[in-house]
Amino acid sequence: MPKGYLIGHIDVHDSAAFEEFKTMSGAAIKAHNGRVLIRNPDPEVLEGEVRKLTIVVEFDNIEAARTFYHSDAYTQARQLREKASDTDLMLVEGI
């Protein structure tokens, strides 16, 4: 079964609040058996425009990724992230 991935591109404008988000979201990721594969605050952008921080989280499948995203724990973290940053976020299924 293909893996599910959460991919985010983030511009942080409140570092202290974002650190709290990272703690909360990290616990939620772990609780849903997610694995952070990439967390890079300085990606080499070759084409187009991308926000400063790139993150990729792998889940066992796309349904597990959706369950994580809609979980109560991540919803609380997400509300904090929305106040601390501007984010482009997507869920994708691997091949």
Image: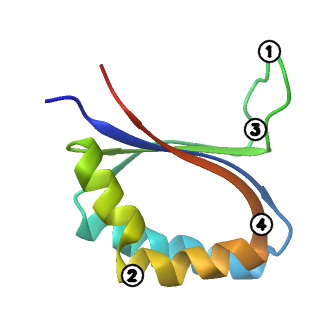
Q: CA distance from mark 3 to mark 4?
A: 16 Å
* CB under 8 Å between discs 4 and 2: no
Counting other residues with Cα less than 10 Å from the Cα at mark 4, is it few (<14), some (14-19), or many (20 or more)? some
**Is the image coloured rainbow, by chain, by secondary structure, or in one colour?**
rainbow
On the image, which quarter does residue 94 sit in?
top left
Residue behind mark 3: 42
Q: What kind of residue is marked 3? A: Asp
Furthest residue to the left? Answer: 1
Q: Residue at 82% x, 15% y: name it.
A: 47
- The residue drawn where x is 76% and y is 24% is 44
Image position of 71 (left or right of 14): left
Q: Mark 3 or mark 4: which comes first in sequence?
A: 3
Which residue corresponds to the image point at 39% horizontal and 69% vertical from the top-left? 70
Find disc 4 in the rendering and name its residue.
Answer: 85
Q: Is residue 53 found left or right of 69 in the rendered image?
A: right
4 or 2: tag closer to the N-terminus: 2
**Residue 82 locus on image (x, y percent):** 70, 73
Q: Are marks 2 and 3 in contact (CB under 8 Å)?
A: no
Relative depth, front residue between 19 and 47: 47
Real-space Cα separation, disc 2 to disc 3, in angstroms: 28 Å
Question: Which kind of residue does numbered mark 2 sit on?
Answer: Ala
Which quadrant, please, contains the N terminus?
A: top left
Mark 3 element type: loop
State the CA–CA distance, disc 4 to disc 1: 23 Å
- The residue that label 1 is drawn on is 46
Residue 37 position in % (x across, y down): 42, 40
Q: Do labels 4 and 1 touch, CB within 8 Å?
A: no
Which is nearer the eye, 31 or 70?
Answer: 70
**Location of residue 19 (image quadrant):** bottom right
Separation (CA) of disc 3 from disc 1: 12 Å
Name the residue tied to disc 2. Answer: 73
